């Protein structure tokens, strides 16, 4: 998997934003002292001395430079720049001279959100949450989008009460979005570019803000982080990086939980919702006598677990997602019962009728949410595992001729894996059944699996085919058609041998358990260190694809070395192929996947039975 976005290396993008932010923070500290933008300690705050609070300007500066270097011009991006400028100016003014009237802040937040929605055309048309699709008619979609932006903006702002808290949670969010994008092969969108830039910018600030903090980001930082997180979420829905509304909710679980708890808590006390207090989640940890640093690390750990649930939800690991999710829900329930985050005490719940009713309603709603998500995630487990092999040899042959090549799997290991599949009731499917499933024309049983082989080696015919027939499993062999030999050669395990014309004909006529697919005709290997789609023109590639397809009479294709780009994919589709396969460390396939970027898990000789089982269950 190539870690690049729009031709720029991912780590370079992060590093440049990181260095820029780290260099700008000392400047913002001096500016804060000069302007008097200091956070003065009081009873509600944790710090003991006045702290500069314009660190958000360093994050914003790194964001601007990152965009200039690695972003693309668009109306969407221009609207984000305008909206973020409004937010940062609002926060900066509030840092220098606090704005006591919350209404004024809300007005400017609504203005910034409106710019993104109406000028940038970034808004929700519909959302998918746990398998349910909700469509928003106009103008309801505009209203909901604006409220979403304002809510997330304030959620991050409200949790910024402890050294490193807002920056750390935001960094986890940005990193998770990038990881999900690469898993789904959706790394070319504006959301991913912004997430990587913001990841570097936020971490660069965190080296000064992690406990004990040397500076604060202030409202200029926390409001900006919340705003850009909301915008990235919306861009993710638009570009299909975020396939479900549950993903950002899971990643932002801690700030969302904290803001909901604050609203309920203040409502029960009859206080204004915007009134500050010292009962937030991080305050509860401090009351438990955890240090500031320990509290931060605990919150990081919980948030990373929620983020991992979102990642495994995306890749289809229902077992892990459900287990971690349930544990986290139990943890949050414990926090509600044992702390003052909602109620003053358990005694208060027993004595106060109003508190008791609300607490019961809270528990019922929480149980309903838990059951709803568990059932939905379990229902989401109807995915297909595709396993990819290359060459098979007996243990003796491998030891003699391919000892150091782990891509050569021993026949003995391959048979053990087939035995495992059979013993644990995995259902073998054919490429045509997978095509039907992808097109939503039919359903597949749970635990469906497809086996694939690349290159068209004779070893597939000699060793794999008899075992496939023995255990009743179907497979497809992707053949490099220019390597098909005219005559069947005598078996020679010391070299790679390719299928002959007679073998191809025999497979088609007599062996239904093995199908044939294309692995190109003669455009398999890179040329002059360039990929096929970089070296040859479109006409040459298309002719090669069509020739291979015609020779094999197939509708299925496997990219050479799993390398492709959007144009190559279009040519594969134009050539008449119905499915095309690549590689991914997470190989589950679900119905809404791109039929021309189907994921496979590569199996090598180091894949133990335990690891093989993990691939099937977790990935």
Image: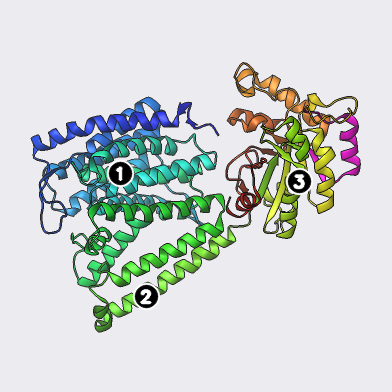
Please state the horizontal and vertical placement of residue 331, each as a whole percent of the image: 38, 65
Question: Badge 1: few (under 14), some or many (20 or more) residues near its Cα, within 10 Å?
Answer: many
Circle 3 SS class: helix
Q: Which residue is tagged 2?
A: 361
Which of the two discs, 1 and 3, sits closer to the camera? 3
Residue at the spot x=70%, y=23% of the render? 523
Q: Which label's residue is closer to the chain start, 1 or 2? A: 1
Q: Which residue is tagged 1?
A: 225
Residue at the spot x=63%, y=53% of the render? 613
Q: Which label's residue is closer to the chain start, 2 or 3? A: 2
Q: Quadrant of the N terminus?
A: top right
Is 251 placed above or below 63 here?
below
Is 67 placed above or below 226 here?
above
Question: Badge 2: few (under 14), some or many (20 or more) residues near its Cα, within 10 Å?
Answer: few
Q: Which residue is tagged 3?
A: 412
Report which quarter residue 287 is drawn in: bottom left
Q: On the picture, is 303 further left or further right than 613? A: left
Q: Magenta segment range?
A: 496-518
The one of 535 and 97 positioned closer to us in this rendering: 535
């Amino acid at each position: 998997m190539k870690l690049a976005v729009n031709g720029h290396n991912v780590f370079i993008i992060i590093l440049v934003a990181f260095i820029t932010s780290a260099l700008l923070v000392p400047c913002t500290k001096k500016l804060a002292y000069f302007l008097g933008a200091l956070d003065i300690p009081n009873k509600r705050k944790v710090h003991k001395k006045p702290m500069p609070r314009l660190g958000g300007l360093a994050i914003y500066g790194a964001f601007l430079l990152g965009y200039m270097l690695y972003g693309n011009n668009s109306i969407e991006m221009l609207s984000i720049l305008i909206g973020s400028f409004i937010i940062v100016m609002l926060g900066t003014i509030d840092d220098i001279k606090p704005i006591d009237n919350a209404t004024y802040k809300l007005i400017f937040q609504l203005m910034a959100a409106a710019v993104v929605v109406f000028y940038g055309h970034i808004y929700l048309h519909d959302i998918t949450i746990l398998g349910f699709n909700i469509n928003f008619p106009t103008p309801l979609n505009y209203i909901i989008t604006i409220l979403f932006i304002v809510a997330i903006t304030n959620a991050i702002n409200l949790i910024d009460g402890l050294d490193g808290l807002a920056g750390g949670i935001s960094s986890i969010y940005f990193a998770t979005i990038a990881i999900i994008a690469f898993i789904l092969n959706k790394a070319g969108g504006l959301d991913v570019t912004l997430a990587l830039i913001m990841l570097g910018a936020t971490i660069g600030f965190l080296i000064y803000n992690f406990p004990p903090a040397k500076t604060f980001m202030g409202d200029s930082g926390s409001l900006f982080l919340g705003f850009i997180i909301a915008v990235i979420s919306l861009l993710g829905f638009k570009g299909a990086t975020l396939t479900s509304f549950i993903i950002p909710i899971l990643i932002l679980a801690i700030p969302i939980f904290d803001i909901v708890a604050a609203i309920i808590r203040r409502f029960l006390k009859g206080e204004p919702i915007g009134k500050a207090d010292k009962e937030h989640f991080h305050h509860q940890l401090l009351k438990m006598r955890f240090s500031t640093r320990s509290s931060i690390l605990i919150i990081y750990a919980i948030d990373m677990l929620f983020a991992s649930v979102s990642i495994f939800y995306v890749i289809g690991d229902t077992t892990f997602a459900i287990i971690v999710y349930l544990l986290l829900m139990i943890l949050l329930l414990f926090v509600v019962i044992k702390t003052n985050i909602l109620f003053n005490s358990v005694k208060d719940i027993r004595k106060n009728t109003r508190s008791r009713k609300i607490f019961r309603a809270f528990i019922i709603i929480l149980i309903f949410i838990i059951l709803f998500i568990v059932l939905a995630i379990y229902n989401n487990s109807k995915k297909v595992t595709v396993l990819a092999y290359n060459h098979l040899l007996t243990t003796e042959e491998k030891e003699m001729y391919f000892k150091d090549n782990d891509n050569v799997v021993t026949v003995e290991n391959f048979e053990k894996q087939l035995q495992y599949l059979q013993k644990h009731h995995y259902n073998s499917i054919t490429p045509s059944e997978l095509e039907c499933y992808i097109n939503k024309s039919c359903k597949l049983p749970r635990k469906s699996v497809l086996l694939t082989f690349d290159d068209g080696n004779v070893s597939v015919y000699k060793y794999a085919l008899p075992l496939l027939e023995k255990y009743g499993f179907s497979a497809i062999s992707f053949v490099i058609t220019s390597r098909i030999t005219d005559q069947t050669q005598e078996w020679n395990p010391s070299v790679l041998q390719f299928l002959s014309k007679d073998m191809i004909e025999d497979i088609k006529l007599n062996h239904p358990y093995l199908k044939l697919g294309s692995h190109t005709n003669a455009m398999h290997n890179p040329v002059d260190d360039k990929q096929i789609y970089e070296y040859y023109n479109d006409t040459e590639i298309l002719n090669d694809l069509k020739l291979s397809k015609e020779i094999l009479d197939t509708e299925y294709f496997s990219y050479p070395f799993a390398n492709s780009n959007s144009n190559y994919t279009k040519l594969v589709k134009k050539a008449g192929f119905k499915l095309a396969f690549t590689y991914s460390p997470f190989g589950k396939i679900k119905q809404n996947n791109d039929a021309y970027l189907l994921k496979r898990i590569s199996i090598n000789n180091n894949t133990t039975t335990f690891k093989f089982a993990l691939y099937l269950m977790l990935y």
